[in-house]
Image: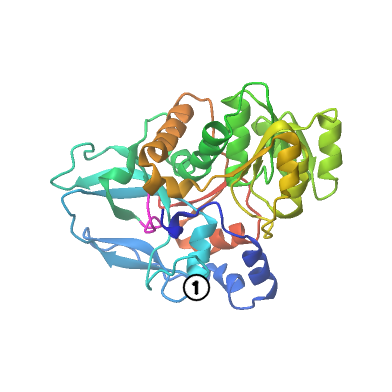
């Protein structure tokens, strides 16, 4: 899988450093007056967020519609999820440099407005989810039919836009990789983030596990408990390792879903029970830890990773299944994405800043409506 799909592996420390020391980067990025918003004046044109210069405020421009290829679908976009990878790309810090100018946005929901001559699975009016290489933060987008999934009316456009990356990662990590069983104890770190809350939701409400949520504030812990966690630990004010001993009667946890890395990863690893499994999905804390192999040996522990985006090339069937399953679970009411904030298209700079400063809880959405 190309590096551009590393949705969950972006180091957040880059954002914190930029926010602390920059007077013209992300701080300026948050000022909506810098956005050049132009209304659509013709049916053959549409508005899109455009990165014209790295580390500068994004603009909203009016663009001309390209023609459809036979296998492509034109989608009227309703909502687009905000991911750290989008922000990195606009700062020039992403693994793969995108050619300027470009439109960010890697997951979105919307409705089909036109189909190419070879498209057979979709028709005008269909509600869809899409996973893209960008281009999602716009009023419309052209995408290959292979990267679209139908959305039932029971799932809102906001919820749909929050499903692919976070819930796809959670399902592959907890179900496919860790093989989590009912009644097992699952620790979720960064439990109030987009991926973290999705993992709590899946583990507690789908897999019927006992979830311990770990997050950096009491407010975030409270939200994770509301999502389904049976208990929580604020690792900013408490010792994670000691608290886990208390909560598990020194038995340890069966599965860890870790999106933090650093010392939190090390404490989580040493808190695993016999034949426990730890799944690495990202490094929000910034530090990529080393694994002491003796711990793996002594407790027969398994350490594994989930790079959700890479499944698109390595095992597209499983990649597609993770999205389809998330849609079905949401339709049935078994899961429910937490939408922490919704911004309009012309507020995209504020949306990026909100995520970069780690103020977001759950998923942040940019709405075109």
Quarter residue 11 falls in: bottom right
In this rendering, position of residue 174 left or right of residue 51 = right
- Whether 222 is drawn above or below 285: the answer is above
- Residue pointed to by mark 1: 34
Residue 33 pos. (x, y %): 51, 71
Q: Is residue 221 left or right of residue 307?
A: right
Q: Is residue 133 magenta?
A: yes
The spot of residue 89 in percent (x, y) is 48, 66
Binning the other alpha carbons within 10 Å of mark 1 as few (below 14), some (14 to 19) or many (20 upward) gives some
Q: Residue at x 53, y 25 (%)?
A: 334
- Residue nearest the observer in this picture, 115 or 111: 115
SS for callout 1: helix
Q: Quadrant of residue 135?
A: bottom left
Does the image show residue 219? no
Residue 94 or residue 255, whichever sits in front: 255
Q: Position of residue 47 (x, y in %)?
A: 34, 62
Residue 52 covered by magenta stretch: no
Query: In this view of the protein, which residue sits in the foreground, 155 or 228?
Result: 228
Instruction: Give the x, y percent position of residue 166.
Output: 53, 43
Region of the chain picked out in magenta, as a range: 131-138
Assign the magenta stretch its main secondary structure: loop
- Which residue is pictured at 68% across the width and 52% down the height? 261
Image quadrant in which you'd find residue 148: top left
**Front-most of 295 and 180?**
295
As drawn, 361 above or below 12: above
Query: Which residue is the extreme one toward the left?
Result: 117
Is residue 115 visible to the viewer in this orientation of the structure? yes
Query: Viewed as shown, does residue 149 lie left or right of 359?
Result: left
Report the residue at 45% width, 59% height from top: 3
Q: How is the image coloured?
A: rainbow
Q: Residue at x 43, y 56 (%)?
A: 105
């Amino acid at each position: 899988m190309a590096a551009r799909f590393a949705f969950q592996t972006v180091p957040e420390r880059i954002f914190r450093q930029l926010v602390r020391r920059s007077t013209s980067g992300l701080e300026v990025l948050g000022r909506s007056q810098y956005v050049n918003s132009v209304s659509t004046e013709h049916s053959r044109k549409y508005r899109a967020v455009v990165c014209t210069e790295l580390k500068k405020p994004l603009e909203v421009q009016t663009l001309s519609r390209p023609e459809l290829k036979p296998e492509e679908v034109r989608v009227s976009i309703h909502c687009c999820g905000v991911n750290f990878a989008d922000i990195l790309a606009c700062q020039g810090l992403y693994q793969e440099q995108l050619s300027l100018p470009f439109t960010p946005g890697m997951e979105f929901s919307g409705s089909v407005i036109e189909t190419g001559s070879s498209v057979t699975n979709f028709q005008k009016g269909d509600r869809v989810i899409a996973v893209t290489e960008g281009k999602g933060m716009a009023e419309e987008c052209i995408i290959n039919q292979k990267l679209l999934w139908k959305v039932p009316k029971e799932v809102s456009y906001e919820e749909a836009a929050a499903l692919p990356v976070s819930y796809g990662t959670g399902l592959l990590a907890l179900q496919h990789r860790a093989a989590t069983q009912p009644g097992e104890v699952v620790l979720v770190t960064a439990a109030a983030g987009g991926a973290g809350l999705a993992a709590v939701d899946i583990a507690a409400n789908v897999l019927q596990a006992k979830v311990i949520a770990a997050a950096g504030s009491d407010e975030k812990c409270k939200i994770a408990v509301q999502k389904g966690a049976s208990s929580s630990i604020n690792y900013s004010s408490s010792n994670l390792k000691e608290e886990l001993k208390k909560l598990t009667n020194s038995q340890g946890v069966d599965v860890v879903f870790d999106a933090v890395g650093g010392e939190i990863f090390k404490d989580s690893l040493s808190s695993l029970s016999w034949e426990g499994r730890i799944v690495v999905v990202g490094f929000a804390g910034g530090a990529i830890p080393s694994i002491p192999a003796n711990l793996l040996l002594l407790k027969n522990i398994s350490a594994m990773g989930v790079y959700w985006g890479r499944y698109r090339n390595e095992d597209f069937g499983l990649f597609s299944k993770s999205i389809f399953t998330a849609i079905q679970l949401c339709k049935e009411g078994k899961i429910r994405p937490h939408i922490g904030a919704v911004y309009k298209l012309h507020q995209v700079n504020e949306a990026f800043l909100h995520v970069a400063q780690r103020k977001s809880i759950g998923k942040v959405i940019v709405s075109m409506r």
